[in-house]
Image (cartoon, rainbow, N blue to C red):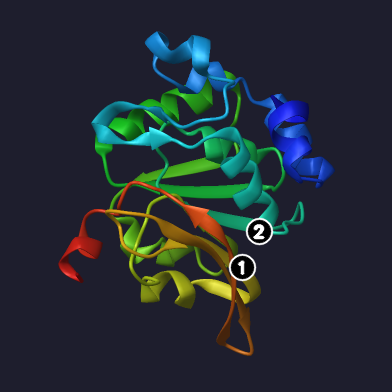
Amino acid sequence: MVSSQVAARGIHDPRVLKALAGVPRHLFVLPADSDQAYEDHPLPIAEGQTISQPYIVALMTECLALKISDKVLEIGTGSGYQAAVLSLIVDRVFTVEIHDTLARRAAETLERLGFRNVRIRSGDGFFGWPEEAPFDGVIVTCAVPEVPPALFAQLAEGGRLVIPLGETLTYQRLTVITKKAGKPSVQQVLDVRFVPMTGEALKKK
């Protein structure tokens, strides 16, 4: 998977490649889909959510340009796979999941597999995790029409926010936003398709 689907498509950061190789992806998907776990496409999980394809996980992680000392916030824990990948690159990962069932299952999976530098909160990711801010990186694994203000506010100076922006019913643009002198510097990466952010984000439409 790592060589043929990730490195072959332009992901070069050795830390990202090593992290993907170090996470048993088949343990983060539904048992019925375990034979497809290492294929390069998304898979359904519980609560109508998905686990992103390996290439997108790698690309979003590389876009964060992380250092080992960084603190990262993830919005949309899902099965916990992206958080596990991040945990092999940085010291501290915080992740928020709006579905309590998914949050509990992800916490159990990560604990069982020994990924113990991840903290999970059940709640609305639209508001981030203010008590733990600022974050050197913020990664959003669900689609929103525009950046939730709290997420940019909780980003450290020089930090990066990686987020799918655009219409939640069609395609979005994977976007990297760097905080420079308190202002957003925006880079668009490629078209993606993610499930929509729920909770407060739906009220903003």
Report crowding for label 2: few under 14, some 14 to 19, many 20 or more residues within 10 A (C-alpha): many
Quadrant including the C terminus: bottom left
Residue 159 locus on image (x, y percent): 64, 71
Lateral position of residue 134 relative to residue 127, left or right: right
169 over 132 or under it: above or below: above
Residue 118 locus on image (x, y percent): 54, 40
Q: Residue at x 50, y 56 (%)?
A: 191
Residue 160 locus on image (x, y percent): 61, 68
**Do tag 2 and tag 1 residues touch (Cβ < 8 Å)?**
yes
Q: Residue at x 53, y 16 (%)?
A: 26
Residue 132, label in figure? none
Q: Quadrant of residue 22?
A: top right
Closer-to-camera residue (111/192): 192
Report crowding for label 1: few under 14, some 14 to 19, many 20 or more residues within 10 A (C-alpha): many
Read off the residue under disc 2.
64
Query: What element does badge 2 sit on?
Result: loop
Q: Residue at x 39, y 17 (%)?
A: 30
Q: Quadrant of residue 72?
A: bottom right
Read off the residue under disc 1.
160
Lateral position of residue 51 relative to residue 101, left or right: right
- The residues tagged by marks 2 and 1 sit, at their Cα atoms, a distance apart of 6 Å
Query: What element does badge 1 sit on?
Result: strand
168 over 98 or under it: above or below: below
Q: Given the image, on which type of amino acid does mark 2 rest?
A: Leu
Closer-to-camera residue (178/118): 178
